[in-house]
Amino acid sequence: AEYREVLQKVSHLLAEYPDTMLRITLHSAIELPSGDRNGLSDPYVNIFVQASNGDEIKLRSKMVKKSLNPEFEEQFEVPCVDLESIRFQVKDHDVIGKNEELGHVTIYQKKEKLSRWPVTKDLKLRQGSLRVTLSLSSKKDWVLKPYAGILKVKIMEAAQLHDTNMLTHQNPFVSVKYLDDEQKTDVCLKGGVTPKWNQTLEFKVEHAVGPLEAQWVHITVKDKELLKEDYIGQVTLPLQLLLTNKKKWWKLFWNQSKNETRGEILLEASFTGEGGYPPRTDETNGIIKATYGVQKEREVDVTTVLRAKVKDGKLKLKANMDLDFVFGCDPYPGAPKELNIKYMKDGKETKVSIPVAERKGEIANAPRTIQHVLAGDHTLKDLQGGFFGSSVSSSAIKNVLSSTKAKLNSSSADGELPQELIVVIIVIFLAISYKFFY
C-alpha cells in the first residue's frame, strides 16, 4: 500500500512514454563491511530515484540476516521520469539504535541513456560491491533478451583508405574495442590504402544493451609508425546492427561529427549464444521483411520485431514512437532514417517507407496517408489483404467525371456551379474520407 501511494504521488511526472517504467533489479552484494560485533551484518538497500525537478522516489529492499554477501534478487518498477540520478545506499539493520550505513553509490546522473535492453552493473562501494540490472520496460512492450555469448569479428580488408604518408606506403592495423576489451590485428606492412588482414578477434558478451556503451563495438584503423600511430578512420557499430549485417563493407569516418567518411572496411561478424530479437518462425504475419536505418548503408533487420507486434492482422505504430527505443538500437546516430516494410497485399509484395525524425528516431514528416495508416489509433489493417481492405474504385469516379464533362463545359459560361459537379465533389470527398478513416 505504501509503495502504491508513492507511485500515485509521482504520477504527474510521467512524460513522453506513459506506459514505460524504469525497472531496477537488485541482485546481490559481496564483501560488505561488518556492522555487528559478530563480524556480520544484516544488510538491506535503500534506492533513491530522483527526477530533475527534485522529486524523489524511495524504495527499500528486504533485509538479509547475518551476511556479508547477501542475495536479494528483488525487482522494482517506477514510472519513467526525467531522471536526474539513481542512488543506492546499503545499510545494516539494528534492532536497537540507528541503522549504520555500509556504503553508497550514485549512478546515471543524466549523462547515460537508459535502454529497453537490460544492463547489469557491478557498483563499487567503499568496501565491497553491489550488483544491479537496469532497463526500461512497458506493459505493452514485447521482450528483447540481452546478449550473452561469444562475438567473433573477422577483419578482412579495407579499401580507399585515407593515406597518412606522402612518400611511402602506410602500415595499417585495426583496433577493435568492446567495453574494456581492446584487441588489435597484426600490422599490414606496406598495405597502403588497400590492406588485407583476414584475422578473427573474439569477445565475451554479457548483458549487451541498446544504445548504452555495452552494446557498441568500436573499430579504429591506424597507421603504425616507428614512434607513433596515425589515425586513419573509425566506425562505431551497435551490436545488433553488426550481427544483422554479418558480412558487409562499412564506411570509415574521418570526422564523424561532420559525417565525413574516407574509405571502407570489410567485416564479417558472428555470434554464438543467446539473446537479441525474437527468433524467426514460419509465421510471417504478412510481413516479409522490415529494416530500420539508412538504406544501403546502415540498416538493422527488424523483421521479427514487427512480426511479433502484429495482432489480428494489424500493426500499430504511434506517430511519436521512438523507434530507437522500440528496436533497442540507433543504427546511424544523428542521421535521418527510414523504416522500410515489405508485406503481402492481394498476393503481391508491397513496400512502404516511413521517414523518421533525425536524432529522436520518431516517425515524422511521413506522407499523410502513411502516417494515417501507421500512426495514432489507426492501424495497418489486414496485412494479408493490404492497407485498406476494401476500397472505392477510382474507375468509378472517372466514369462519373466523364459523364458530366459536357454539362460542365456548357454551364461554365453561365457562371453557375452545376449540380452534377457538386455531386462529383461530394463523391470524391467521401471516397477520400473512407480511405483515410477506414
Image (cartoon, rainbow, N blue to C red):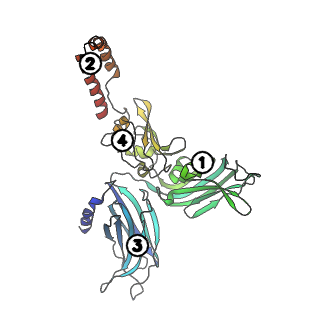
Of callouts 1 and 4, which one flags the residue occurring earlier in the amino acid sequence?
A: 1
Of callouts 2 and 3, which one flags the residue occurring earlier in the amino acid sequence?
A: 3
Q: Nearer the viewer, residue 257 or 93?
A: 257
Image quadrant of residue 346?
top left
Q: Is residue 368 above or below residue 159?
A: above
- Residue under numbered circle 3: 71
Of callouts 1 and 2, which one flags the residue occurring earlier in the amino acid sequence?
A: 1
Residue plotted at (35% across, 60% down): 82
Q: Nearer the viewer, residue 135 or 65?
A: 135
- Residue under numbered circle 1: 261
What kind of element bears circle 1? Answer: strand
Residue 313 appears in the rendering: no
The mark closer to the camera, 1 or 4, is: 1
Tell me whether circle 1 and circle 2 mark residues in contact (CB < 8 Å): no
The mark closer to the camera, 3 or 1, is: 1
- Residue under numbered circle 4: 315
- Residue under numbered circle 2: 421
Q: Marks 1 and 2, Cα distance to the nearest angstrom?
A: 57 Å
What kind of element bears circle 4? Answer: loop
Q: Nearer the viewer, residue 29 or 399?
A: 399
73 displayed left or right of 413: right
Quadrant into which the C terminus falls: top left
| Callout 3 amino acid | Glu
| Callout 1 amino acid | Thr
Q: Residues within 10 Å of mark 2 (few under 14, many from 20)?
A: some
The mark closer to the camera, 2 or 4, is: 2
Q: Marks 1 and 4, Cα distance to the nearest angstrom?
A: 37 Å
Of callouts 2 and 4, which one flags the residue occurring earlier in the amino acid sequence?
A: 4
What kind of element bears circle 3? Answer: strand
Q: Is residue 286 above or below residue 413?
A: below
